[in-house]
Image: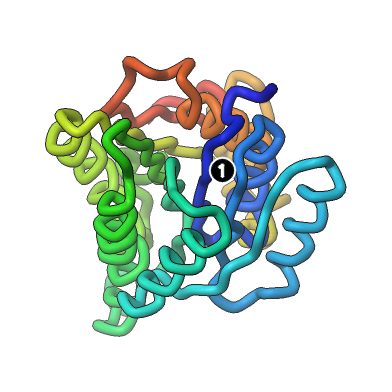
Amino acid sequence: MGKLSGKVAIVTGASKGIGASIAEHLAAEGAAVVVNYASSKSGADIVVDRITKAGGKAVAIGADVSKPEQIDTLVAETKKAYGKIDILVNNAGVYEMLPLEAITPEHFHRHFDLNVLGLLLTTQAVVKEFGPEGGNIINISSVVGRAALPNGSVYGATKAAVDNITLALARELGPKNIRVNSVNPGLVSTEGTAAFMGSDFEKAVVAQTPFGRVGQPTDIGKVVAFFASDDSAWITGEAVQVAGGART
């Protein structure tokens, strides 16, 4: 039996990249997984297919978690499929790097509505469904929450907010036996970061990394599976950098 046998996990933004890897690692440990997607049903279906072919349990549920009414749908459909919720991984997010002069209200709200408000409202909805035994929340943040990058003021601010929210909610929800931690990746090779691969930016990141490479989605999925399991039962309020030894 896996370390998560009998558990039900929602992974937001899980149709590709880091989210897909997280969903697969949780399923490999025995969790029944909801592969959430906002627009790419085909991508989510591929992830579900990989999980089920490997002997795991998964369903794809569409919901844009920047929209409160769709969060309600996500929770209701999860309960319809599996009857309960034990684990929430807040992975859904967006990022775009823009210099100060190019920032607009639309750019700001696109980031904060999903990366921060969506995370809070999804957590709010899921916490209501946790039983007396508690639950587990893992927020996917980023090293840029601490390492300020040129042209990244808005995106970096959302991740700094996520780190603060993680600590605040850990203290608030601890008495209810709910753990809250964040995993803060460095540069990871995904569909979303393909434009950076081979660039001077990637070379600069690798040069700061003792392992001499960027991350892979599986590097993040393994750490999230640890935080989702009882192996981390006495850990809460932590923001753990998973960046190959690079320091911020």
- 197 to 114, vertically: above or below: above
Q: Pick the quarter of the image with the C terminus.
A: top left
What residue appears at the point 20 percent right and 42 percent down from the top-left corner?
Answer: 164
Residue 49 screen position, x and y as percent: 81, 57
**Quarter of the image holding residue 123?**
bottom left
- In front of the other: 120 or 159: 120
What residue appears at the point 69 percent right and 65 percent down from the top-left corner?
Answer: 44
Residue 42 screen position, x and y as percent: 74, 73
- 24 to 113, vertically: above or below: above
Q: Residues within 10 Å of mark 1 (few under 14, many from 20)?
A: many
> Quick check: 132 left or right of 18?
left
- In front of the other: 221 or 208: 221
Q: Secondary structure at mark 1?
A: loop
- 245 to 73, vertically: above or below: above
Asked if one can make out residue 235 in the rendered structure from this viewpoint, the answer is yes
Residue 195 screen position, x and y as percent: 66, 62
**Quarter of the image holding residue 194?**
bottom right
What sort of colour scheme is used for the picture?
rainbow
Amino acid type, callout 1: Leu
What residue appears at the point 27 percent right and 35 percent down from the top-left corner?
Answer: 132
Asked if one can make out residue 214 in the rendered structure from this viewpoint, the answer is no
What residue did someone put label 1 on? 187
What residue appears at the point 75 percent right and 43 percent down from the top-left corner?
Answer: 56
